[in-house]
Image (cartoon, rainbow, N blue to C red):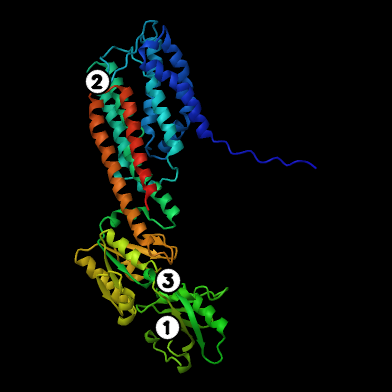
Amino acid sequence: MTAVSAPAPPVDREWDRLVTVTGFGLPVLVLAVVPAVQYPFWQWTALALATPVATWGAWPIYRDVLADLRRGTVGAEAPAALAAAVAFAWSVWALLFGGAGAATHAHPLELLAPPSTGTAQIYLEVTVLLVLAALALRRFVPATAPTGRRTWAGRWCAPATLCLAGAAAGFWTGADLGGNAVTAGLAVLAVAAPLAVDLAAPVAAAAALRRADELDVRLDASADAAAGAVDVVVLGRSLLCSPPAVGSVALVSGTGELDALAVAAALAAHSPLPQASALLGGATFPPSIAEVAVDGSGTVRASTGARSITLGRPDALDLAVPVELGAPDLVVAWDGQVRAGFTVAAQRHPDAVDAVGALRALGLTPVLLTSATDAEAQELAAGLDIELVLPAAEEAGKVEVVRRLRADGHGVVVVAGPGAAHAAAADLPVTVGGSGTSGLGIPTGTPRAAATVVRLARRLSGVTEGSLAVAFGAALVGLPVAAAGLLHPLLAAGLGPAVTAFVVLNGLRLRGTR
């Protein structure tokens, strides 16, 4: 028998490239910053080691920057790519033609820009540091960072940096100080590479979305601003009650139970009524429906092609309910006659008290807005520390309540089932169950998750603002100093990655949200 070999594990080329570049680059950094180890012609050793870093190591960066330019955009890696290329090219020129290749050439460790010494300055260590930082960023920062989260400043920061670098180099060249021109232009590019301003929002959003997956909640990264401004939370039975279940099914004579359940399941998928979710699993193969319409009372009407069908509460239909159906919570009708009734049982969830308390702890004032009767609403709200109870509210009335709260200056978050019209009218909708693509979402039967997802959205807003503040501050201080020719390119090349590291680590704090 021939043995079957296991498939080879995938090759992590980014990691291999980073390790190789680190091996070649670290000796260059040591030679450049430790004068005591600078033996005669040490700079040629540094050039030999830096060449694969600046060419093979940086090739993915150059390739992606060129691809962005062909698409008419300037990506976040453009300053790093240009700075690495300029530093290496200038160093080669200085070694060959500028006098930096002499046996006695010294390269002291300096924080401020060196005085103009013609063309005898080399910056191979700047190339190494920038390439290492860019490759590390590619390897460790999530590749799924949503590009739509880029701020306007992030989109314009790279082009502005390139323009400032060109202006600084042009000014010093015009002042007949060519050495200062290279130093200033290179320092401007290096201080902005990698581009922390461009990464602040996407990195935080990627970390928050990953944490949302771990917590089994849905987070729309664009909802963070609204989450920080809400102060009222509108609750309903979809959050505070356990998932509803069908208690009993009553049928009109001649109606099959399987037929009634299939029709009810098809319509329940479009119903905003909390009780309707109990009918969703009632049939394995519900019929296909078209021309779906939902009115203000939550009644769903549609067509199967052969007949018109309806699902809703008995008091919301203009049809007589047969006596033999008793007092159902929901009824299904077709061809102008009520055919079946369903009683739906839903008890208050054991975690409802903790859920409301957690929302209170976030500074939110809870309001219970429900279509239940006054007695049912008061029973549901008992012991929940709810500020206001509004029972017997139709869908149009719920929308009006939310609009009035917003008109009074409140930021409103609505926690409701899929398709609820009053949730769409809120500043921040939180969908219980379903698979919406906007706002926030939590699974059915997890009331404490409502506070969790709002807290995560708020933290995303705070972390993003903090990262942007640090990145902006570093840019506003570092760029003018670099353009003035006062900042050494090596210090600039360390400052840019340091700020970016802060942005990344600050974003990763979202992974600890509970």
Name the image quarter holding residue 74.
top left
Tag 1: amino acid: Asp
Give above or below for 508 relative to 489: below
Q: Position of residue 122 (x, y in %)?
A: 36, 16
- Residue at (24%, 15%) from the top-left corner? 176
Name the image quarter holding residue 502.
top left
Left or right: where does residue 156 sit relative to residue 9?
A: left
Circle 2 or circle 3, nearest the eye = 3
- Badge 3 or badge 1: first in the primary sequence: 3
Give above or below for 113 relative to 478: above
Residue 393 shows in this picture: no
Q: CA distance from mark 2 to mark 3?
A: 72 Å
Q: Position of residue 267 (x, y in %)?
A: 47, 76
Tag 3: amino acid: Ser
Q: Are marks 2 and 3 in contact (CB under 8 Å)?
A: no
Q: Position of residue 138 (x, y in %)?
A: 44, 36
Tag 2: amino acid: Trp
Q: Which residue is under mark 1?
A: 329
Q: Which residue is under mark 2?
A: 172
Q: Which residue is under mark 3?
A: 242
Circle 3 or circle 1, nearest the eye = 3
- Badge 1 or badge 2: first in the primary sequence: 2
- Residue at (50%, 83%) from the top-left corner? 248
Q: CA distance from mark 1 to mark 2?
A: 81 Å
Label 1: which secondary element: loop
